[in-house]
Image (spheres, coloured by chain):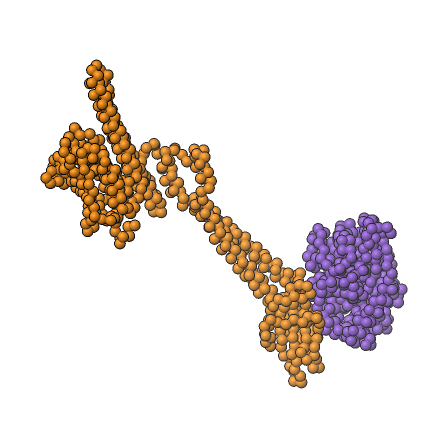
Amino acid sequence: MWQKSLSPQNLSDDEKLALKKAPSLRFRFIVSGVIVICVIAGIAINLIFDYSRQLADLSYDRLLRSALLQMDENIALIDNQVSVDIPWSAFATLAQADEDRVFYKVESLEQGFITGYNDLDSEPPKQPVLDQMQFYNQSYSDELVRFAWLERHLTNPESAQTVRIILGQTRLSRERMASSITQRAVEVVVLIALVAIALIMIGSHLVLRPLHRIEWALEERVKGDLTPITINTPKETHHLKVAINHFMARLQKNLEQLENYTADAAHQLRTPLASLKALAENARDNTSPEKQHQALENIVRQCDYLSQTVTLLLNQAVVSHRLQTHRLEPIDLLEPITASCREHAVPALHQGVRLSYECSLQEAWVLGDSFSIQQMMQNLIENAVRYSGHQKQQQTDVIVRVEELSKIYRIQVIDYGDGIAEEEKERVFERFYRARYDIAGSGVGLSMVKDILDHHHAHIEILDTQPKGTTFQVDIDKLSFFRGQI
Amino acid sequence: MKAWFTIVMCFSLSLAWAESPTVWFGKKNASRVLVINSALDLTSFEPILQDFVAQYPDVRVAYRDVNTLELYYLTIKEQSNPVASLAISSAMDLHFKLVNDGYARTYQSSLTDNLPQDFKWRDQLFAFSLEPIVMLVNKDAFPGPLPEDRQSLLQTIRQHGPAMTKRIGTYDIRQSGVGYLLASQDARQADLTWGRLLEAFGSHDVQTYCCTHNIIDDVADGKLVLGYNLLGSYASQRAKDDDRLKMILPKDFTLMLMRAALIPKNAPNPQDAGLFIDFLLSDRAQKMMQEQGLLFPIHPDIKNAEDPFVVSAPGPTGIIELDQQLLVGRDHAKQQRFIRNWEIAFEIQREE
């Protein structure tokens, strides 16, 4: 995150490997663009092929038509016999297709073969119609030949005959013309395609540039700069920018919490350490064995307390981490509550406190984090036990009660201790606030409870117990299946 | 009728085959043999063949002199298993038709690629000479002034009728492929003149021949006073050495004819045939044609204007183009009608 630049040499091996494996947006963009252009170009070229061939056929068919009409003009009935005198000019027309072979046949349906190639028996693909010329391709003499075909009546007063003229020309000039047209057109299409591909490449570069700008803006920051990105970016990347900014804000918050926590921990540990040191010095300086023994007892107690504090800090760290990282999920609220009651029943009894659990529910589903709830309950119970059992000779009670209301579950932790003064109720959730300094405690527990409850969107209230004592009342929303919050 | 005609053709072919023995060139122990069927007189072609075998000693050339029409039928007859690997003819139209009908194979080399488009077709037919069609007169025997063109020839015939009777020679267009081609091109170029000539020829008992050299021989002898529509190369060759003869390029129009070569489709030795075509097109052979007075090359060296093998026609030249129009002259119906008209004019009984 805080590297100066993203140039490959600054990347770790893993990052390089990941970079190698990562699919490239630009590459995908270009590849899909190139594929689309190639498909379009392919279709265009295909069309050009057909079109150029049609065009060549169209122009050379005119020659063929003209030649055939000239031949036709010189067919006559002389003495009731069909007579053909092919004009030189007819074939001069065909000679414009300079390399093409010419085949023809003139026959009369009544008289039979008249002139041309006797073995040229070609039938047009369409139903022959008198006086209608047809053009078609057919193989003759080992080559594909374009034929013009015409049948017409020849009449004079004495007789009538039907004459059929077939005139064919090989396709060499046509193919040459078609291919020259095609070549030109294909050149143009290929040029356009190349230009389009070049544009796509440039375009992809331009399109991705705002991303690079965001990247540079992040890369060029000094260490620890988590302020929002302010550079102007297009609409398409605006969300990305906002997301990054949000992410950075969260990161900033996490960092702040971390700093707080570190400060907490230092604060929490400094006091017991100082008192431990004082006790130790006291023990060292005392000459009387009883007093020394007394001082060592104090050291041991202080160590227990320190150990508790460390455990609490660790739990708080874990809870804080869980709250940051774990999503809330449906849990049975009773599980963490019963677990923490079970855990504290015996230690409470040692302190002369009877811990009882009152609940008539089988299960109580809420959206929450089981570990955090358990920590919360432990803190509340510990707190209640600590304050109610303090320096009392007779046994007192601490009651954990769970009730179901219409939309919420209500958890009450009731003690019969000295209670909390009205003006202090507001402050107990503050960090390091301690109502009474003569009672061991870190002053962190209730603030953690507040954090956990805030995270669960739950509500806590401090009530007075009758006749005396304190009741912590937690209201937590039921899990509503109908709202689809599973 | 067609079958009958074919039988007659085959018979005359076999006769012709017997008459023209194969002439061999090159070493007897040469590894390759190239058989050429050609309608070119050996006198014009021998030096070229000698030079070829001298350049390519591995090749032995068998040269068979065949009439143009016979050559056409022979190539079709032998289409699946031809003896010859090269066919050379002056009957451009028949050669063109052979290519059009698919009897030839493609050959391409740097030399054929350099050949102008007008002198080749489909890379299957290659022209290697371009010669004028001329009249050859016997100066001493000719009555009156020598004709400049067809009109003056007609005039001479009219004025000196008896002296001209039976003393004009031309091709029998039924026997000679090139004869038919020249006659049909004459008719095409100037229909009216052709009609008059035909009439005049017919009424004066024009002699018909199968081959050019026979006509030239008779003109030289004085048996004929004029040979009409002769191949320029032969006429020029003979006129050069014979004072009695004069070659005239008609002033009204001079036909120009190409000699062309093709390789039959299933030729046994197309490689050497191609080699020979390249040789004919090479500067060396083309220069040889001109310098030794054998043939008219495609691109003559015109430094020497007096050279008889450089065409300097007094009038317009009508080059017989090597294109699809040649097929029209060989159209079955047109050919029949043309020959019938010719026969009627010449009052020759039809062979049928």
Q: Nearer the viewer, residue A321 or B325?
A: A321
Q: Residue at x 18, y 41 (%)?
A: A399
In the figure, is residue A436 to the left or right of B49?
left
Q: Residue at x 20, y 21 (%)?
A: A294
Against A356, is A89 above or below?
below
Q: Is residue A80 visible?
A: yes
Percent x, y of residue B58: 82, 49
The quadrant of the picture occupied by the C terminus of chain B is bottom right
Q: How many marks?
A: 0
Q: Colour of chain B?
A: purple
The quadrant of the picture occupied by the N terminus of chain B is bottom right
Against A452, is B241 above or below?
below
Against A445, is B120 above or below?
below
Percent x, y of residue B304: 77, 51
In the figure, is residue A206 to the left or right of A84?
left
- The chain drawn in orange is A
Q: Residue at x 85, y 72 (%)?
A: B165
In the figure, is residue A328 to the left or right of A99?
left
Percent x, y of residue A349: 20, 35
